[in-house]
Image (tube, grey):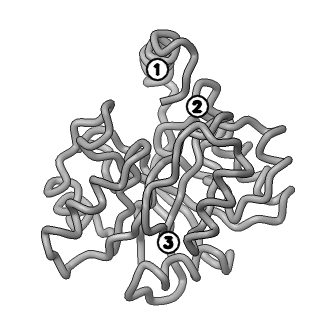
Amino acid sequence: MRFDLHVHSDHSADSANKIEDILDICLKRGMSGVAIMDHNTMDGYRYAVSLGRKDIILIPGMEVSSAKGHILAYNIKREVPRDLSVKETIENIRAQGGVAVAAHPYRVWSGLGEEVTLLNDFDAIEVQNGRSTIKHNDAARKLAGRMSRPFTAGSDSHENDTVGMTYFESRSDCLTADDVMREILSGNGSTGGRNRPMMESIGYGVKCIGQWMGRGLKKM
């Protein structure tokens, strides 16, 4: 079973993906479930739940802007405040019974970086992100191994073309979000799909760094 564990909807300021489209595209591309990981809000996930669909597993979550970089919060019940320290963010996620994951750790303008990731007790590391280069994803995979942590993967899609194009693949059947979390933490899954092609890197980097500078070097 395949799960895109990192998708942004139009509830994120930098994404145009409509929830209905995300769910339809995920199914079309063979996904069994999806995590709507909007920036600092769970409104996208809540809207997806309100649609009442039974044909796809919806995993609660959000992408949290900690004081040092982005952290993926899975299986939480309410929003985690932004701008907390990394340690405080992880503790807030765990207090809700959630799973704290270091998002794309080698992304300069929004990742935590290697040193910060190593210094904190994450439940897992995102090792394949569809908007990261293969070099950065390979480095993240090595970091997960160095830390003896399991891993996640997702498209980090902000547009319909890339929804479901990067995924975590479970070895066991999953019927609920809890099942997916257990499979991730077991370390027995695998990842697949795209990395960001080098031809896209220059334009993507210029755009994102420009936005980052426009925010006063503040992470979204």
Reading the chain from its start, which is encountered first: label 2 or label 1? 2
Q: Is residue 175 above or below residue 90?
A: below
**Residues under numbered marks 2 and 1 in contact, where contact means CB atoms less than 8 Å apart:** yes
Q: Which mark is residue 18?
A: none
Mark 1 residue element: helix
Name the residue nearer the viewer: 104 or 60.
60
Q: Which mark is residue 169?
A: 3
Query: Which residue is labeled 2 in the image?
Result: 110
Task: Give the amino acid type for the residue marked by disc 2 in the picture.
Answer: Ser
Callout 1: 10 Å neighbours few (<14), some, many (20+)?
some
Task: Give the amino acid type for the residue marked by disc 3 in the picture.
Answer: Glu
Mark 2 residue element: loop
Task: Give the amino acid type for the residue marked by disc 1 in the picture.
Answer: Cys
Q: Quadrant of residue 57?
A: bottom left
In the image, residue 152 lies at what x, y percent? 58, 61
In the image, residue 3 lies at what x, y percent? 41, 68
Which of the two discs, 2 and 3, sits closer to the camera? 2
Give the residue drawn at x 51%, y 64%: 74
